[in-house]
Image (tube, rainbow, N blue to C red):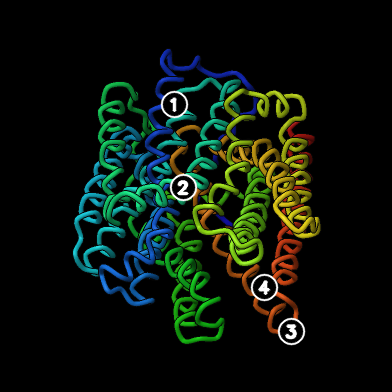
Amino acid sequence: MSAPQGRPGPTVPTGPAGPPGHPQRWLILGVICLAQLTVLLDNTVLNVAIPSLTRELHAATSDIQWMINAYSLVQSGLLLTAGSAADRYGRKKMLIAGLALFGIGSLVAGLADSTPQLIAARAGMGVGGALLLTTTLAVAMQIFAPEEQPKAIGIWSAVNALGFAGGPLIGGFVLDHFWWGAIFLINLPVAGLALVAVVALVPESKAPRGDRPDLLGALLSTIGMAALVYAIISGPGHGWTSARVLGAATVAVPALGAFAWWENRTDEPMLDLRFFADRRFTGAVAGAVLITFGMGGALFLLTQHLQSVLGYGPLEAGLRTAPLALTVVALNFTGIAAKWSARLGTPGSIALGMVLMSAGLVAIAEIDTGGYAGTLAGLLLIGAGCAVANPAMAHAIMSAIPPERAGVGAGINGTLAEFGNGLGVAVLGAVLSSSVASGESLSEGLGAGQLVGAVAVLAGGFVAAGLLRRAERVSA
């Protein structure tokens, strides 16, 4: 892949030396994690409100789908663009803009009295969410010295797990006491508090030189990623050969192909494709896609296992997935996972984490105790694996990108997570459907899907660890 003459190649940090951390870095980390948590909770909180929305807004199934998808499609499509904007215009500015947009969108959503209003508000929240997801990780990389970055990213990753587990629980609690709009209005005090704290505490940082905005790259990546994610999430419900899926894929493939061609041609690309020449980067990218593929799909099946096989209600099922998130939080907040990672190194951490997660998925699929015990054992193993592997993977991606492009690195990390999760739900959902269609019971079909997820996670761990180990040897 050739590059234009005179365009400098990416500089990659090679050692732990670096500037000292910000004196208020841990307080700032708490602030940006609070901002992050509001976005993550909203990824799952709407699912428990579906019956209320159907009843009170007279929402059809297609309306419900768009209420959920409008948020995720806009967010996933804008992650790279949001990260690039943060690098160019200032990460603090984009963090403030993200909180403001997310808060305004939450207010409109909470007061909506029709499905079009709620869908539009969710799309606006997706714009704010994209800005928040990219700037929080980028700011964390800027305020911590290199030797503290793994622990900081571990805490950031633990907040992700809290968001996953907390959304259904908070949504269920709120709906037991208030009307459906309250699940959005509870974002307002959190976003307001985070906004004040960001203005007061977070330092501004941006790329030392202001590149011209890559407007064509931003347009192509947004269209391509949004269309790709839409095709993936539409496949299980509408069929992979349906006009809806094929039409979205017909938009996604040319748009992403044109994006890659343009980024390799322009002098100031939003995403420098030569990052992929770095084995550390490609190893982390490959592992991130496979881990989120396996985990996203397997956890989607887990919720069905808890409700359809073990017979728990939505709130009870949410409570019984909490041990996964609590394990991640305990190991990351105490620094235990960071200590393991320091001893094992990045390749070893990723390999160990993937083995633990894969074993957890196998335990859920194969340990048949007639109750929750096998699932609990699997959740604890998955949580331990996530606590070790996810921060190591995110740090590998971020450290393989020049510090001045931290926003783009965070956008890549977020895009991989969105893509892998969506693909995992689609593919493992298809495994479940085909298993049930061939005469297997729902329990057997769910188990088959979990095992496919376990294989993907294990493969991702060894692929990523192998590439990262080779990169370390080359560097040495």
* Amino acid carrying mark 1 in the image: Leu
Label 2 environment density (alpha carbons within 10 Å; few <14, some 14–19, many ≥20): many
| Residue 255 vs residue 363, the one in the foreground | 363
Numbered mark located on residue 29 in the image = 1
Residue at image location 78% in from the left, 53% down from the top:
363
Quarter of the rendering containing residue 247: bottom left
Point out residue 274 in the picture as x, y percentages from the top left corner.
58, 49
* Amino acid carrying mark 4 in the image: Leu
For mark 1, give the secondary structure. Answer: helix
Could you give the CA–CA distance between mark 2 and mark 4, rounded to whole angstroms? 26 Å
Point out residue 334 in the picture as x, y percentages from the top left corner.
61, 23
For mark 4, give the secondary structure. Answer: helix
Q: Nearer the viewer, mark 1 or mark 4?
A: 4
Which residue carries the number 4 mark? Answer: 432
Which residue carries the number 3 mark? Answer: 438
Which residue carries the number 2 mark? Answer: 169
Q: Which sits earlier in the primary sequence, circle 2 or circle 3?
A: 2
Residue 346 in the image: above or below residue 98:
above
* Amino acid carrying mark 2 in the image: Leu
Quarter of the rendering containing residue 211: top left
Q: Which sits earlier in the primary sequence, circle 1 or circle 2?
A: 1
Could you give the CA–CA distance between mark 1 and mark 3, rounded to whole angstroms? 50 Å
Point out residue 427 in the picture as x, y percentages from the top left corner.
63, 70
* Amino acid carrying mark 3 in the image: Ser
| Residue 269 vs residue 188, the one in the foreground | 188
Label 4 environment density (alpha carbons within 10 Å; few <14, some 14–19, many ≥20): many
Q: Nearer the viewer, mark 2 or mark 3?
A: 2
As drawn, is 222 to the left or to the right of 472?
left
Point out residue 456 in the picture as x, y percentages from the top left corner.
73, 58
